[in-house]
Amino acid sequence: MILPRPQRKNWMPKLGVNIDHIATLRQARRENFPDPVKAARVCELSGADSIVCHLRSDRRHINDDDLHRLRKSVRSRLNLEMSISPEILRAAVLVRPDQATIVPEKRRELTTEGGLDVFGQKLKVARVVKMLKQNDIVVNLFIDPEKRQIEASREIGADFVELHTGRYANAADAAARLEELRKIRAAVLFGKKIGLGINAGHGLDYQNVTRIAKISCIEELNIGFSIIAASLFIGLSEAVKEMKRIIN
Ligand code: PXP
């Protein structure tokens, strides 16, 4: 498959670091440390191009106070992952992150499972996109790498789509992984062609990120769990720097 020529010489995706699990650790003991805001600062100083956090309806990790403090402290870009619930939309509009990533959210899931069904709930998602854009928030929709989801995202005015890489990351064998990679490449090509910015993320780690980072035209990779897990052994700063090194 021929991919569009990268618009930048030596194309390399940016790195958004998701710091939710710093707050997960804090909530495990209902303590006031470790502080996700402090972690975000370390990530930025170590090369993160943006800070990502997910304000869930059950506030299981990041809470409203974290979000407000992050807004004040983040100097790169703040990317808020959010569902389409009215309560979360109100919080987003109040805080005004630089970017909002709309994700599906189920109460019992351990992490975001699958992409947002933009095609199947176009009107509902469109209302949220419109409200965010009216508040000058860049909109990114987290979707599976499928043509109809990409088309629907474009139709309702999203700026970016973030392609869900979970199936690629969790593929049972090499053949299945290649097939998922093929779908992601095709989705990047199609999304670019119809004028969307393309991001990717979920389940990426120090091994599987390379093939995704090599796909030209992906703007940003959003990575959380593997970086926070590595930070236990090598420290957060080194964990972010190492991911940047691999991506570059
Ligand atoms: N992108 C989105 C939209 C997500 O919901 C998540 C998980 O919070 C990630 C990226 C990061 O996934 P992981 O923690 O598996 O790196």
Image (tube, helix red, strand yellow):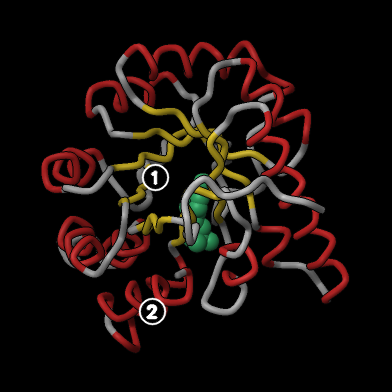
Give me the residue at 63% from left, 34% from top.
116
Give me the residue at 49% from left, 57% from top.
11
Q: Position of residue 61 (x, y in %)?
A: 34, 53
The answer for how far apart the CA atoms under marks 1 and 2 are is: 23 Å
Q: Position of residue 190 (x, y in %)?
A: 72, 36
Type of amino acid at the residue the image marks with label 2: Glu
Q: In the rendered picture of this protein, how many numbered marks are placed on residues?
A: 2
Q: Is residue 228 left or right of residue 181?
A: left
Q: Nearer the viewer, residue 171 or 244?
A: 244
Q: Is residue 207 left or right of residue 15?
A: right
Q: Nearer the viewer, residue 118 or 13?
A: 13
Q: Quadrant of residue 110?
A: bottom right
**Mark 1 surroundings within 10 Å by alpha-carbon count, few (fewer than 14), some (14 through 19), many (20 or more):** many
Q: Which residue is mark 1?
A: 54
Q: Position of residue 52 (x, y in %)?
A: 36, 49
Q: Secondary structure beneath disc 2?
A: helix
Give me the residue at 51% from left, 11% from top.
127
Q: Nearer the viewer, mark 1 or mark 2?
A: 2
Q: Is residue 224 left or right of residue 150?
A: left
Q: Quadrant of residue 133?
A: top left
Q: Is mark 1 within 8 Å of ligand 1?
A: yes
Type of amino acid at the residue the image marks with label 1: His
Q: Secondary structure beneath disc 1?
A: strand
Check the image and report above or below for 76 versus 141: below
Q: Which mark is residue 19?
A: none
Q: Position of residue 36 (x, y in %)?
A: 23, 58
**Mark 2 surroundings within 10 Å by alpha-carbon count, few (fewer than 14), some (14 through 19), many (20 or more):** some
Q: Which residue is mark 2?
A: 242
